[in-house]
């Protein structure tokens, strides 16, 4: 009889645990899904809330995309050779990270947005543009700008750590070959840093799915806001918020599992090289 093959181990030498947490989540989620599918009240609530899912996904995707672009710019600015640029980026990152997201959301919506409208009207007055009112600045986009500002500070730290993980010797070798700063970043630094950046960047994306629920304080009709209005209308708070929780759990756990699978795929590719 051949010897039994050892169980696969993680890179740190420990055996992979059976995901009992996932089994528990699937059991609870399956129970809720069965209850929703077999109850007319739950089905009615779900059909109402599904209108907010599309908006939640839209807010998350646009906010994350803009925050990633701004975060990358901040990370590069924090590593600039110019002191003023480095300190300015550091100032932005530390201040924004120290403000609760809901406070930043309210500040952008009711302080920054009116200021931007006044600035636009002042500039437009010099070139013949008609003035606009603050109410012409949609609350949806105020919320997106606030989430972009908030998450750009956290994402910039992810990019900074990834960029600093690249071996300095390779950068020096690229300099000796005469590559410009842009070409060093494009062909040497970023392709290597992205492997370090992707896992925490994915975690921030999942966190943004949950934090997108904060836009409901502005009356934006996402899943949370529609759930609040539905519960107020039918007085079935238990059933309504069960469905709200089920929707967010489906989105976040589904994304987390996809990201873990992607990370394993990247790890296997590295091992084959």
Image (cartoon, rainbow, N blue to C red):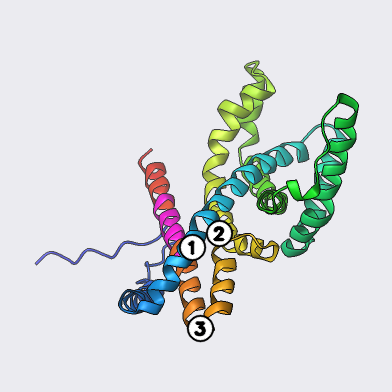
Residue 260: image location, x then y, percent: 43, 56
Residue plotted at (22% across, 63% down): 5
Q: CA separation, marks 2 and 3?
A: 25 Å
Q: Quarter of the image holding residue 81?
A: top right
Q: Quarter of the image holding residue 76?
A: top right
Q: Would you call the spot at circle 1 few (<14 residues within 10 Å), some (14-19), or many (20 or more)?
A: some
Q: Secondary structure at mark 3?
A: loop
In which quadrant of the rendered image does the N terminus lie?
Answer: bottom left
Name the residue beneath numbered marker 2: 209
Assess whether residue 254 is covered by the magenta stretch.
yes
User: From the viewer's perspective, is residue 263 above or below residue 241?
Assistant: above
Q: Would you call the spot at circle 3 few (<14 residues within 10 Å), some (14-19), or many (20 or more)?
A: some
Name the residue beneath numbered marker 3: 236
Residue plotted at (38% across, 42% down): 269
Q: Are marks 2 and 1 in contact (CB under 8 Å)?
A: yes
In which quadrant of the rendered image does the C terminus lie?
Answer: top left
Q: Start and end of the magenta stretch?
A: 253-262
Q: Secondary structure at mark 2?
A: helix
Residue 19: image location, x then y, percent: 37, 71
Residue 91: image location, x then y, percent: 84, 48
Q: Is residue 25 visible?
A: no
Q: Are marks 2 and 3 in contact (CB under 8 Å)?
A: no
Q: Secondary structure at mark 1?
A: helix
Looking at the picture, tell me which residue is in the foreground, 210 or 192. 210
């Amino acid at each position: 009889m051949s010897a039994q093959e050892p169980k696969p181990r993680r890179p740190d030498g420990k055996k992979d645990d059976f995901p009992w947490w996932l089994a528990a989540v699937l059991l609870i989620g399956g129970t809720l899904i069965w209850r929703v599918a077999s109850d007319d009240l739950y089905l009615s609530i779900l059909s109402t809330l599904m209108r907010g899912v599309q908006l939640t996904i839209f807010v998350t995707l646009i906010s994350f995309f803009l925050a990633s672009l701004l975060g990358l710019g901040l990370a590069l600015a924090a590593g600039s050779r110019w002191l003023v640029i480095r300190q300015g980026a550091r100032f932005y990152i530390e201040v924004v990270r120290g403000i609760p997201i809901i406070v930043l959301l309210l500040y952008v919506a009711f302080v920054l947005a009116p200021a931007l409208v006044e600035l636009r009207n002042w500039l437009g007055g010099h070139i013949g543009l008609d003035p606009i009112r603050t109410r012409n600045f949609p609350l949806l986009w105020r919320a997106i700008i606030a989430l972009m500002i908030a998450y750009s500070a956290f994402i910039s730290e992810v990019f900074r750590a990834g960029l600093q993980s690249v071996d300095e010797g390779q950068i020096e070798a690229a300099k000796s070959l005469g590559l410009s700063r842009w070409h060093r970043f494009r062909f040497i630094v970023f392709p290597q840093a992205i492997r370090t950046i992707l896992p925490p960047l994915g975690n921030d994306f999942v966190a943004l799915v949950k934090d997108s629920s904060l836009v409901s304080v502005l009356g934006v009709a996402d899943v949370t806001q529609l759930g609040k209005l539905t519960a107020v209308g039918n007085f079935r708070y238990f059933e309504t918020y069960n469905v709200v929780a089920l929707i967010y759990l489906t989105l976040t756990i589904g994304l987390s599992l996809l990201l873990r699978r992607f990370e394993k795929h990247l790890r296997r590719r590295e091992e084959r090289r």
